[in-house]
Amino acid sequence: MAQRRFPTRTSLLTAALLAPLAATSAAQSAPPHTTPVAATATATTTDHPAPWTDRVQIQSGPAGALKRMHAPDVALRIVTPDDSEALTPKGLALLFSGNEPDYFQRNNLPGSIIEGQASPAITLMPNVAKALVGGYFRYAPDALPAQTSTLRFSADTWALVHQGNTRKDPLYRLNHSSTIEQRRADGTLAEIISCNDSDNRATLEAWQADDYARLKGAAQMITMKCIEKLVKRIPAMYPRPLAAEDVSAYADGAAPPARVRVYAALGRTTTLYTDAACREDYRDRIDVKYNNAGDKGVLGIPVTETLRSKENERFSTLSYQEYEVPGGKPLIFEARFDASSRVYCDGKLSGQFVAGPGQDYEVEFEVADKICRLHIRQVHADGSMTPQQARATPTICEGTRAPVRIEPRQDMQVLLFSPGELQIQDANQSSAPKQLSDDTGSSEALQQMLQQASSKPGTRLCVVVPATDYSSVLHDAVRERVLDAPQVLPSLWEETSTVNQRRNAAADAPVDIAAAVTRCKAFPIKEFAAQ
């Protein structure tokens, strides 16, 4: 499955940076690598390091150890029909005769090492990358990170492997694989880019002619393809600061919140990070899944064509969440298939943008024609939509805040009023209900409960009263609080007579908190509209 790319200026940056890099690559040759077992080697192209080199170190070396017949290819490995060190004569016959040779084993034979022809991941790629990274920070000096990080080029496969079914077949295929790893200051992995090429074939004589001229040309082409992947990821690896939202026009600089509707689907998860500089630095995290999202529109985001079309889908249950998020602050959305679905998208579906104060948005994870897409749209008052520009989500940042995980909109507090008394029960808990005397002496305790409920996004109130015109000190305080912020505490009022009717009891029968909870849990979440 392919990933939909977010509209950014990355393509312009790619063109600007790759033009001089092509010349750099063409001018480079692969110098002999005299110490293949060295763990890392810092790449240099000048005796005067640029200022950014103190923050971003470029290194190269072999890939991590794997359980196979040979070490990672720091230098060229040539596998011929005569390479039988690790195989019995019978095994060698299976590899180089017959109609179905075992190419996987053949590719991993130890072969012969040509020290003078280093893998492009050891020399050429790091040198070209240094020109790239230096050019990027000249283009975007404000993207220079405060903390150090490392770009490490790891050589894995660099081999010419005999391809025929017999010893007389002359063709050799060039196999290459390497990775570019971005690691944080503490050494943890932040990003990895894989480069693989195995489609170039020629005779061994053609590969070796003119001091491996064909091999060096292939190394330059491989380098440019791999570096182009790095160019596309550099703005996410080292992002420029997002433009700050001007909140001076708002009272006390407090911008009004934005709202977002997130659609859910079976086997998929869409994650929302609020006030998010990156995935490690955010205020709230909300995972929206099919089994914890309900059919609701409690915040009043205008109906869109997307919502109407989903309502009309046959054999599908509409499922979505609506949230209030800080206005003028960055949001990050990312989407993925759940591990249990055994399906995945090719690449990351993720994007970051600043939510406009008072603006509405909707987010949809769509899979169509075997392609994954993450749609982020701004919703206007009339229900029309425009695509929201989003940039690639930063892989690292210098944030220090401890994130807070916020669960989806599922909490509910049940309030049961009877003359002179209020009982409060968390619908998801089996603990004893809290009991308050319905008088002014309990007002402070009630306000604490309401404050705690409103501080947890998604909490609902289900209020059971003796009659629609019921009035008391605590009841009126609850209704006043809900009227002040209906979107924060979506609520529903129910009479005890209706509760009794649903459980086939007499209309005037006493209602206990267990019956109230049972009735409240039967309501669809969409019934908890703003009062």
Image: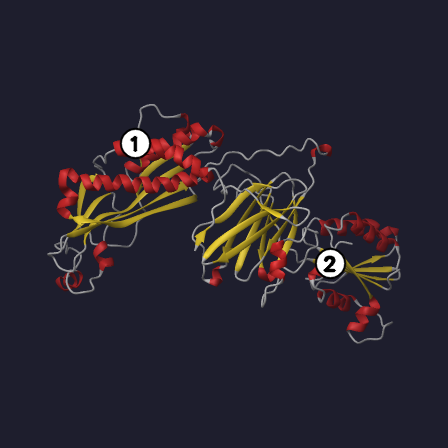
Q: Do the residues labelled 1 and 2 touch (CB within 8 Å)?
A: no
Direction from residue 493 to residue 194 in the image, left or right: left
Number of marks: 2
Displayed quadrant of residue 102: bottom left
The amino acid marked with disc number 1 is: Ala
Displayed quadrant of residue 40: top left
**Residue pictured at 81% horizontal, 72% vertical:** 500
In the rendered image, residue 441, in percent from the top left (x then y), is placed at 86, 51
Q: Dot 2: few (<14), some (14–19), or many (≥20) neighbours within 10 Å?
A: many
In the rendered image, residue 433, in percent from the top left (x then y), is placed at 76, 61
Front residue (pair 361, 257): 361
Q: For marks 1 and 2, give the one nearer the viewer.
A: 1
CA gap, disc 1 and disc 2 = 64 Å
Direction from residue 151 to residue 332 in the image, left or right: right
Displayed quadrant of residue 56: top left
In the rendered image, residue 408, in percent from the top left (x then y), is placed at 63, 55
**For the residue labelled by badge 2, is the local secondary structure a helix, a strand or a loop?**
loop
Residue 105 seen in the figure: yes
Residue lying furthest top in this view? 48
In this figure, which residue is indicated by the disc labeled 2? 528
Q: Quadrant of the C terminus?
A: bottom right
**Residue pictured at 78% horizontal, 51% vertical:** 482
Residue lying furthest left in this view? 168
Q: Dot 1: few (<14), some (14–19), or many (≥20) neighbours within 10 Å?
A: few
The amino acid marked with disc number 2 is: Phe
**For the residue labelled by badge 1, is the local secondary structure a helix, a strand or a loop?**
helix
In this figure, which residue is indicated by the disc labeled 1? 23
In the rendered image, residue 364, in percent from the top left (x then y), is placed at 56, 53
Residue 113 against residue 90 in the figure, above or below: above
Q: Residue 254 carries which label?
A: none
**Residue pictured at 10% horizontal, 56% vertical:** 168
Direction from residue 156 to residue 88 in the image, left or right: left
